[in-house]
Image (spheres, rainbow, N blue to C red):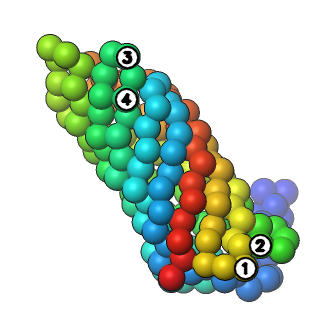
């Protein structure tokens, strides 16, 4: 019974206030998980509190270079003013080059972040994306990808 109460409270809190998510947002996401990297980031509005995010990026470290494509489904909840917080889940694929060893990998990912929408069509975000990789040669454990994003909304 207690779990049902908290679920209803959560659903009520996320649907009480109207959310203004831009139809499209395009920008960059720069962060670090086992090496510095950047991503081209695109967000697409789905409905009132939901959107898709696609990130195409690279990672560069001392031992390995990698490219990856990640797709996330996100739930966006307003805080106050121009602030929102969001959670998401998704997955991705990529390729890596580790000197004599190269190949492909797959991953599942979560997402937790906060964003601020300026009065101009610009958004800044800070998020943490835990990623669980599936390739013993590249990543077969949990990596925490923490990144700062800036996107133009249109």
Q: Are marks 1 and 2 in contact (CB under 8 Å)?
A: yes
Which circle's residue, 1 or 4, is located before the other in the chain?
Answer: 4
Q: How far separated are the C-alphas under marks 3 and 4?
A: 7 Å
Q: How many marks?
A: 4
Q: Position of residue 77 (x, y in %)?
A: 71, 69
- Taking the image as shown, residue 121 lies to the left or right of residue 82, namely left
Q: SS of the residue at dot 4?
A: strand
Which circle's residue, 2 or 4, is located before the other in the chain? 4
Q: CA distance from mark 3 to mark 1?
A: 40 Å
Alpha carbon separation for disc pair 2 and 3: 39 Å
Q: CA distance from mark 2 to mark 4?
A: 33 Å
Marks 1 and 4, how far apart at CA: 35 Å
- The structure residue drawn at horizontal position 66% and vertical position 79%, both measured from the top left corner, is 120
Residue assigned mark 1: 119
Give neighbour class at mark 2: few <14, some 14-19, many 20+ (Cα, 10 Å).
Answer: few
Whole-angstrom CA distance, mark 1 to mark 2, is 8 Å
Which residue matches tag 3? 62
| Residue 69 in the figure: left or right of residue 30 | left
Mark 4 highlights which residue?
60
Foreground mark, 2 or 3? 3
Residue 82 is tagged as: 2
SS under mark 3: loop
Which of the marked residues, 3 or 1, is nearer the chain's N terminus? 3
Q: Nearer the viewer, residue 78 or 90?
A: 78
């Amino acid at each position: 019974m207690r779990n049902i109460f908290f679920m209803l409270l959560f659903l009520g809190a996320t649907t009480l206030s109207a959310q203004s998510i831009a139809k499209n947002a395009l920008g960059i996401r720069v962060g670090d998980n086992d090496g510095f990297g950047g991503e081209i980031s695109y967000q697409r509005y789905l409905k009132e509190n939901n959107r898709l995010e696609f990130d195409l990026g690279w990672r560069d470290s001392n031992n390995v270079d990698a490219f990856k494509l990640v797709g996330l489904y996100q739930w966006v909840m307003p805080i106050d003013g121009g602030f929102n917080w969001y959670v998401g889940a998704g997955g991705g694929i990529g390729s890596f080059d580790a000197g004599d060893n190269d190949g492909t990998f797959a991953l599942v990912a979560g997402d937790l972040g906060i964003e601020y929408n300026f009065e101009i069509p610009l958004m800044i975000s800070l998020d943490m994306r835990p990623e669980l990789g599936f390739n013993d040669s590249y990543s077969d454990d949990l990596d925490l990808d923490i990144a700062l994003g800036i996107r133009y909304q249109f």
